[in-house]
Image (cartoon, rainbow, N blue to C red):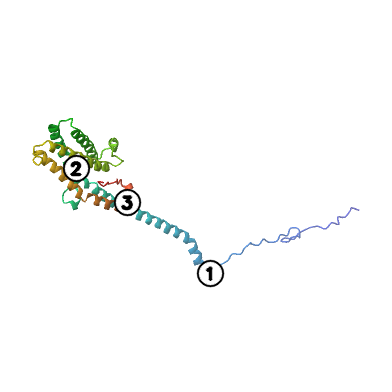
Amino acid sequence: MANADFSREQNQTPGGFDSGSYREAKRPDTEAVRLTPLQQKLAGLEKALPAALAKQGAALVLSVVIMLAAFVGFGGAKVRGKYNEARQWFTTGVSADNGYALSEELTTRANTAANIITTGANTLGADSAEVQAAQAALDDFSACLEAVQNSSKKQSLTSLPYYQGSAMHALCQANEALGTVIDQLYAKMQEQAADPMKMGAVQGQYGQFNSAGTIIGNLQYNDAVYEYQNDVGGFPASMLGRLFGVQEVEPFA
């Protein structure tokens, strides 16, 4: 008798399952949360906020840049305009001086000094100590005056004994030195004259020389320069001046 197979037949009915194949349905970690209308509006605002801030920040930066550029442009032009006016004062004079100009009066000093020296050389001799001293002083004075009038390089003035880095200062010192030696030369010529009060043409030249010196001493040039320096010397005018090529305007002192 054949052995009967008493093993239980594992037939599954359609749609059935066994305990080994059972898997628990996976639940979502979080359930979808439905937002209220108010929460939806807040969420929308939150998303839009960074973009709005970025736009506002860019607009603010652009506004600052425009304002800064306008300040630099208008401010620099104003400082440059003051400089262009001030640097002409040496040649054209300041309005308070009623047409008198420092450059013109100094040129008069140079021309009349040359005429006095020529007369002195004819009267006292070219080897006279007074004539030679006056000629040396005139040469120094003329070099300084030419340098200032033509804005030439200051290196050419370094040989002058009174040059200390400023052409205008050297010119002022040279003018004083010239005045001293011309006085000495004229006094020596008076000693040789038959009548010291009647010196002829040289007397007129000497009078013009001293008259120009008196005018220079009364000019308002220095006052105008000091006021200008106060206007452009502080911050931010000094910074703007450097950006716009403004140079120093020196007093005659």
Query: 15 or 54, which lies in front?
Result: 54
Q: Are marks 2 and 1 in contact (CB under 8 Å)?
A: no
Residue 247 picture location, percent across and down: 29, 45
* Mark 1 burial class by Cα count in 10 Å: few <14, some 14-19, many 20+: few
The residue tagged 3 is: 233
Query: 168 or 59, which lies in front?
Result: 168
Of the residues tagged 3 and 2, which is closer to the observer? 2
Residue 87 picture location, percent across and down: 24, 46
* Sequence-first disc among 2 and 1: 1
Any mark on residue 36, and which? 1
Query: 35 or 69, which lies in front?
Result: 69
Q: Indicate left or right for 48 with 234 as reference.
A: right
Give the amino acid type for the residue marked by disc 1 in the picture: Thr
Q: Is residue 239 above or below residue 160?
A: below
Any mark on residue 106, and which? 2
Alpha-carbon span between mark 3 and mark 2: 28 Å
Secondary structure of residue under mark 1: loop
**Residue occupying image coordinates x 44% and y 57%:** 54
Give the amino acid type for the residue marked by disc 2 in the picture: Leu
**Residue occupying image coordinates x 18% and y 39%:** 184
